[in-house]
Amino acid sequence: MVLMLAFAGFNAVNGQTQPVHTKKPAKKNAAAKPVVKDTVPLVEAEPEDTVDVSFGKNIINLRTFNGWVLDDSNKWVSSPNRIPFRNPEYNNKLYYKYDLGYGNIRQINVIEMKIDGVPYLGILFEQYKEVYKNHPDSIFRSYIGADYYLVKTEDFLKLWNDKLKIGKPYEVDLMAEYSGLVGYKDVKKRPEYMSSEINKDLRNRIYIDTTVKTYLQFGFMPVKTPKGSFMRFDYGLAYAHRGEAVRPFDFKVFKEKYYEVNLDLFHKFARPQGLVIPKKTVPKTSAAKPKSSPGKKKPTRKPDDF
C-alpha cells in the first residue's frame, strides 16, 4: 500500500496526472440483437394455366320444374325450383333460409366447352348455396353458385331413354372429366372463375388418386298423373375406379323427395336438336350377280325364302 501511494506521488510530481489503468473484467458476449430492415412484401406470382379453357354457345336451359317432399305431417308439398323443407314451419318465405329449401335448383344450363381443344358439354346446376350477412345489422342474403360437370356429348344424350316406359325407373351415370363449384354475383364472371378452378383442379391432381372417377348420377321415373305426363328425377355424386361398376342409384329417395318436370319439356332438354348425333349409315353394297348358264332357267324363289 505504501509503495502504491509513493508511485502515485511520483507521477504527480512529474506532471503525469492520468490515473493508473487497471484491467477491467472481460464482459460476457451478449446475444446479438436482430437487425430489422425495411423489406417490401413479396408478391407471389400467380400460377400459369395448365390448360386452355374455352366456352362456346349455350345449348339449352331447364328452368321450369317443381320440387316435392313428403313433409313431417305426411303430406306431399311442392314449390317451384325448390324442394321444400320437411318441417312446414320452415316453408314460410320470411324464414331466412327459405331459398335453400331441402334442395334447390334455379336452373340447369348446358353449354359447349373445350379443354385444350377437346370438346365437352358443361352441365351447370345454378343454385342458392348459403346465406350470409354483409354486416351484423344487415338482412340475410343467399349467394348463388353453380356446380359444374364436364361430360362427353354422347354421354349427355343418355339422359333420355328411347325405350322408357311410364312407371319404370331408370338410371344414368355420367362420368365427369372435370367438376367443381364456383360462386358469383355476376354471371358474366362465371366463365373466368370456372377456367381458374379447372386449372387449379389439374394442378392439385398430383395429390389425389386420379384413378377414382367422379360420376354425376341421375335417377329418373316417368309418370302419368291426372295433370299430365312428367319426369321425376333426383341426382347425386358417385365415385368409382375407371372400369369398375358405380354403386346403383337408390330409388327409395322417390318415396321422400324429387324434382318433377313436364315430360315433353324434359325430352327437349335431354335431346336438343343441335346435339342429336345422327346414326351412321353403312352404304349397302350389292354383290355382283352370277351370270346364268346358257340354256338354264333362273330358279324361282319361294315366299319361304324371304
Image: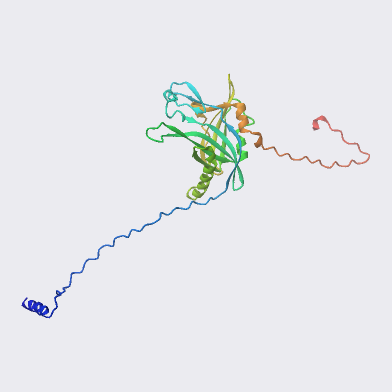
With 163 as the anchor, is 189 left or right in this view? left
With 305 as the anchor, is 103 left or right in this view? left
Q: Is residue 59 visible?
A: yes
| Residue 184 or residue 286, whichever sits in front | 184
Q: Is residue 254 above or below residue 37?
A: above
Specify the color scheme.
rainbow
Which x, y percent locates residue 259?
53, 28
Which x, y percent locates residue 19?
14, 74
Q: Is residue 213 visible?
A: no
> For the point 83% across and 31% down, which residue is it?
302
| Residue 253 or residue 14, whichever sits in front | 14
Q: Quadrant of residue 10?
A: bottom left
User: Where is the C terminus found, in terms of image quarters?
Assistant: top right
Q: Is residue 259 above or below residue 202?
A: above
Q: Is residue 290 above or below residue 170?
A: below
Q: Quadrant of residue 222?
A: top right
Which x, y percent locates residue 280?
71, 39
* Number of residue marks: 0
| Residue 70 or residue 109, whichever sits in front | 109
Residue at the top extreme of this rendering: 226
With 280 as the anchor, is 19 left or right in this view? left
Residue at the left extreme of this rendering: 2
User: Where is the N terminus found, in terms of image quarters?
Assistant: bottom left
| Residue 119 or residue 206, whichever sits in front | 119
With 142 as the anchor, is 11 left or right in this view? left
Which x, y percent locates residue 254?
51, 27
Residue at the right extreme of this rendering: 295
Q: Is residue 9 above or below residue 239?
A: below
Q: Quadrant of residue 305?
A: top right
